[in-house]
């Protein structure tokens, strides 16, 4: 099965399960704390792209203050997102294919989605984010911390769901962003759960 079809079908199967597990109370999560700087840099009513929006957990919060467009490859995730964030706009599409005009967004959020994109597409994806972002606009992105050409799991969140990941290590991710033109404001290695042991994901806050 093609890699992105694995992702689409996998998230279609577990969409409701993820919502039941994680819910919509983003303000109570550690990830919300990382959003504070992002939100503070965007004016009320500003345009935000939620790339890989899932079932709309963050769009649910952001659309009360900003004009939000969410994009996700999973039809079932988008269906839930439309219910959870009725004030936002949602598009079911591979986020590597979205083409808004230059300087369109004030901010781009991409939580836990770039890590599912084949890493040979990362530079082009991030360059497109840069193009669509306004000058002084900001991004908050999740990356791998370790080198991972590609990896799979056969039981993602139970139910025998197959899932795909790909990414670079911290040094390469930061270098790639700088080469594209981003100014790194901060980067943080995050340990989401004690069961994962060492931190597994890199969160980067950057400016155009």
Image (cartoon, rainbow, N blue to C red):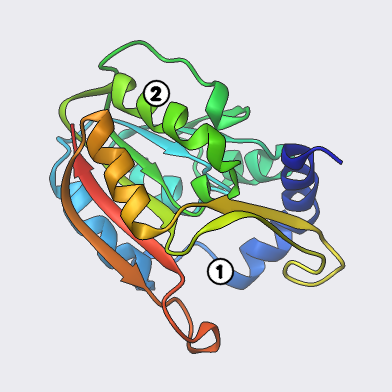
Residue 46 visible to the viewer? no
User: Where is residue 58 shown, x and y percent of the image?
Assistant: 43, 51
Q: Quadrant of residue 76?
A: top right
53 vs 58, left or right, is right
Please state which of residues 156 and 199 is positioned toward the viewer in this rendering. 199
Q: What is the secondary structure assignment of the residue under circle 2?
A: helix
Judge whether 97 appears above or below 90 on screen.
above
Please give the label number shown on residue 105: none
Residue at image location 81% in from the left, 37% down from the top: 2
Residue at image location 60% in from the left, 41% down from the top: 118
User: Where is residue 159 shown, x and y percent of the image?
Assistant: 85, 69
Please state which of residues 4 and 148 is positioned toward the viewer in this rendering. 148
Please state which of residues 87 and 205 is positioned toward the viewer in this rendering. 205
Reading the image, the residue beneath label 1 is 22
Q: Earlier in the sequence, mark 1 or mark 2?
A: 1
14 vs 28, left or right, is right
Residue at image location 41% in from the left, 15% down from the top: 100
Reading the image, the residue beneath label 2 is 128
Residue at image location 35% in from the left, 59% down from the top: 170
Please state which of residues 103 and 54 is positioned toward the viewer in this rendering. 103
57 vs 81, left or right, is left
Judge whether 19 appears above or below 21 on screen.
above
Count of numbered marks: 2
């Amino acid at each position: 099965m093609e890699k992105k079809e694995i992702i689409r079908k996998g998230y279609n199967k577990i969409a409701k399960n993820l919502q039941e597990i994680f819910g919509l109370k983003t303000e109570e999560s550690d990830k919300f704390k990382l959003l504070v700087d992002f939100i503070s840099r965007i004016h009320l009513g500003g345009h935000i792209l939620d790339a890989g929006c899932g079932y709309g957990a963050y769009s649910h919060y952001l659309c009360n203050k900003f004009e939000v467009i969410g994009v996700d490859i999973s039809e079932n995730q988008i269906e839930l997102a439309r219910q959870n964030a009725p004030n936002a706009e949602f598009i079911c599409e591979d986020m590597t294919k979205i083409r808004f005009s230059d300087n369109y967004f004030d901010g781009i959020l991409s939580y836990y989605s770039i890590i599912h994109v084949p890493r040979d597409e990362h530079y082009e994806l991030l360059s497109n984010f840069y193009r669509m972002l306004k000058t002084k606009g900001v991004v908050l992105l999740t990356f791998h911390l370790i080198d991972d050409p590609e990896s799979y799991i056969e039981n993602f969140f139970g139910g025998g769901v197959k899932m795909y990941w790909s990414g670079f290590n911290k040094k390469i991710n930061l270098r790639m962003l700088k080469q594209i033109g981003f100014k790194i404001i901060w980067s943080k290695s995050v340990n989401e759960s004690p069961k994962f042991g060492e931190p597994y994901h890199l969160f980067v806050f950057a400016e155009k």
